[in-house]
Amino acid sequence: MRAYSFVTVDVFTERRFGGNPLAVFPDAHGLTDGEMQSLAAELNLSETTFVLPPDDPAHTARVRIFNRTHEMPFAGHPNVGTGFVLAQAGRAKDDKLRFEELAGLVEIEVERDAAGAVTGATIAAPQPLALGIRLAPEAVAGCIGLAAADIVTAAHPPLRAAVGNDFVIAEVTESGLARAIPDLAAFRRVLAETPALEGRFALYIYVRDGNGSRIRARMFSPIAGTWEDPATGSAATPLAALLLSLGTAQSARYDIAQGVEMGRPSLLRTTARRTPDGIRAWVGGACVPVLRGEAMV
């Protein structure tokens, strides 16, 4: 039997037991794919990361991300939290890290306080904005116990968007955001009836404030075992990129509050910019260490 150390951190928060919890195995060398998946399922968090030697020695690490049921090509809070953990361990060069992932290279910039202590990280999503299938408001509403009138379509219809990991994004009314409850059977039905979703259906709903720079959001992915997620960086980034795409500005910043309804308030600071290869997005936030442990495999 082999022992592998792990740590947990709460991501996108400045206090313990807020934000989104993440488990990080800083040295996963020797673990098989099946063992990584089993450990992620055992820990039962929305994601767990496993740090491996990079294929390119110029990069910091190869990072694999697993949720309860499968490996993910990219995710936001796992990268922010893993960056925080590795920076605390002294593995950042000039406060930068580069992670090799299935979706591509992810660049992380370390955040520090005035005393130089690591407080969090900002990551660049690995791909430019890609927009996909549009879904009917009625279908999306049915997945979260709302009426079609609760889905706001003035700016855009419910649609799939990605910058490395895809989500269906829908604007909703303020009361709809508060009342949303995921319906697993409805999620499965929409997924089965929509081949263009390519076997994945996670729903990110949001409300904008008066000037549009502050956002409240919730994310549901019950098919993957995440009934609701308290902070979803890989959904916040395509949302920021999507909102920028709707206007003519060259860049925009959005502060996204998530997890409020779960009692785990989170703050995700996002930026989107127009670049030569499309609209790119970044997300950052604070992290707090919580637990240390050892897994026997």
Image (cartoon, rainbow, N blue to C red):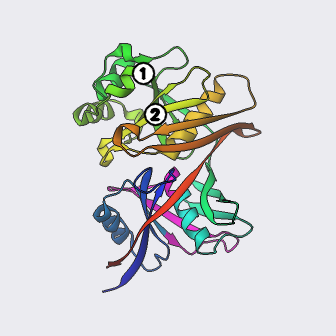
Q: Residue at x 54, y 67 (%)?
A: 85
Residue 294 is marked as none
Q: Quadrant of residue 62?
A: bottom right
The image quarter containing residue 269 is top right
Q: Which mark is residue 174?
A: 1
Circle nearer the N terminus (2, 1): 1
**Observer able to see residue 74:** no
Q: Is residue 46 above or below residue 143?
A: below
- Left or right placement of residue 108 versus residue 45 in this view: right
Horizontally, residue 71 falls left or right of residue 185, namely right
Q: Residue furthest bottom?
A: 1
Q: Amino acid at mark 1?
A: Glu
Give the image location of residue 246, x and y in percent: 64, 23
Q: Secondary structure at mark 1?
A: helix
For mark 2, what is the residue? 217
Residue 256 visible in the current orientation:
yes
Q: Residues within 10 Å of mark 1 (few under 14, many from 20)?
A: some
**Amino acid type assigned to the residue bearing label 2 in the image:** Ala
Q: CA distance from mark 2 to mark 1?
A: 10 Å
Residue at (75, 67) in percent of width and height: 94
Q: Give percent across and percent down for residue 2.
A: 35, 85
Front residue of 193/4: it is 4
Q: Is residue 16 above or below residue 135?
A: below
- Residue 131: percent from left, percent from top: 55, 32
Position of 139 with respect to 248 (left or right) is left
Instruction: Give the residues in magenta.
Output: 51-79
